[in-house]
Image: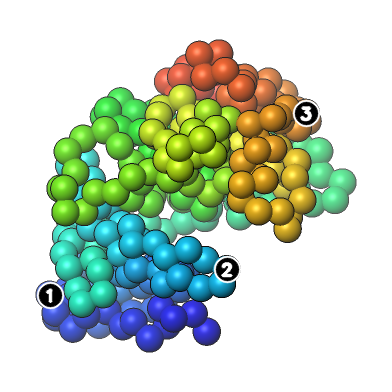
Amino acid sequence: MAEAASYEIPTSVLETLVASGRRLVLDRRGSTVWEVETQQGRYAVKLGYPIKATSEWEAQEWTALAPAREGAILQQLDRGNVSYGEWEHGTWNVQPWHQGNSLYDLWQPHRAEGASSEPDLSEALSCAEAVAALHAAGWAHGDIQPAHLIISDEGTALIDLALAQGGDIPTAYDFSYRGCLVHYESPEISRSVLETGTATPTMTADVYALGASLFISATGLRHVAYPDDVSRKDQRQAIVDGPHRPVNVPGVLGKLIDAMLSPEPADRPTSAEVCKELSSGR
């Protein structure tokens, strides 16, 4: 069991929330996420802690700071009742819980054997609108992936903003951007990480990541082919070297994804243009 399983929500946080119940949702290296029930509704509680060096992993201190960094961003974006602070191993945040299905889970029927129907453009539009709204507020997300697009009847919630860039971040909780989940990185992000160890999140890279997210959710295929067992360095080099896989999604969505996955940032549509194209194609 991962080390984070021993990390319960700090008592002071539970007492502030007046929690009536809690459920462990995610337990991974550097982060634990809980769903907490209160009289005011459900909340997500995130705990961050440093990753210790092992034979397979380098030590990473930034994971301890990520919850507070995200909390500061969510407050600037006025995303509901959000708080954050420090605990003995790192930082924490509390934010409203978003109920719904991830893009990948929602589009599972389109990946079934023999499936040929075009995914719902309204659902794709809802995801694009969530990204465009963040961009309109002046922020780049930096970590768009299907699991961070939570779709419900009320629309799409774009979650996990700990790596976002666009406003003032408290110096004590800030850290360098080292890329995101490689399956959704744009060539320029992968190239920068390979060359310097860091990169800068951009809105054009977000559009690429959204295109890669739509593609993998519709087809089950990563945007660039590489073996599952190669290193992250080799994965990033494959993205830099390209090209991306042929986009075999039918209709308007396929043509749009192909444009979003352009290797040249200037050739990609903006998130607002993606919304316009999806809206007119419905």
Q: Note whether 173 is above or below 3 in the view shown.
A: above
Residue shown at 48% from the left, 46% from the top? 180
**Within-10-Å neighbours for mark 3: few <14, some 14–19, many 20+:** few
- The amino acid on which the numbered mark 3 sits, given as a three-letter code, is Pro
Q: Note whether 77 is above or below 66 in the view shown.
A: above
**Within-10-Å neighbours for mark 2: few <14, some 14–19, many 20+:** few
Q: Is residue 134 left or right of residue 87?
A: right
Is residue 275 visible in this depiction of the protein? no
In the rendered image, which quarter is residue 119 located in? top right
Q: Which comes before the other along the chain, label 2 or label 3?
A: 2
Residue shown at 32% from the left, 70% from the top? 49
Q: Note whether 268 is above or below 105 in the view shown.
A: above
Q: Nearer the viewer, residue 199 or 208?
A: 199
Q: Position of residue 140 (x, y in %)?
A: 36, 33
- The amino acid on which the numbered mark 1 sits, given as a three-letter code, is Thr
Q: Which comes before the other along the chain, label 3 or label 1?
A: 1
SS for callout 2:
loop
Tell me how far mark 3 sits from mark 1, CA to CA.
Answer: 51 Å
Which quadrant: the C terminus? top right
Residue underneath mark 3: 246
Residue underneath mark 2: 56
Is residue 58 visible in this depiction of the protein? yes
Residue underneath mark 1: 16
Residue shown at 16% from the left, 64% from the top? 85
Q: Position of residue 154 (x, y in %)?
A: 39, 45
Q: Nearer the viewer, mark 3 or mark 1?
A: 3
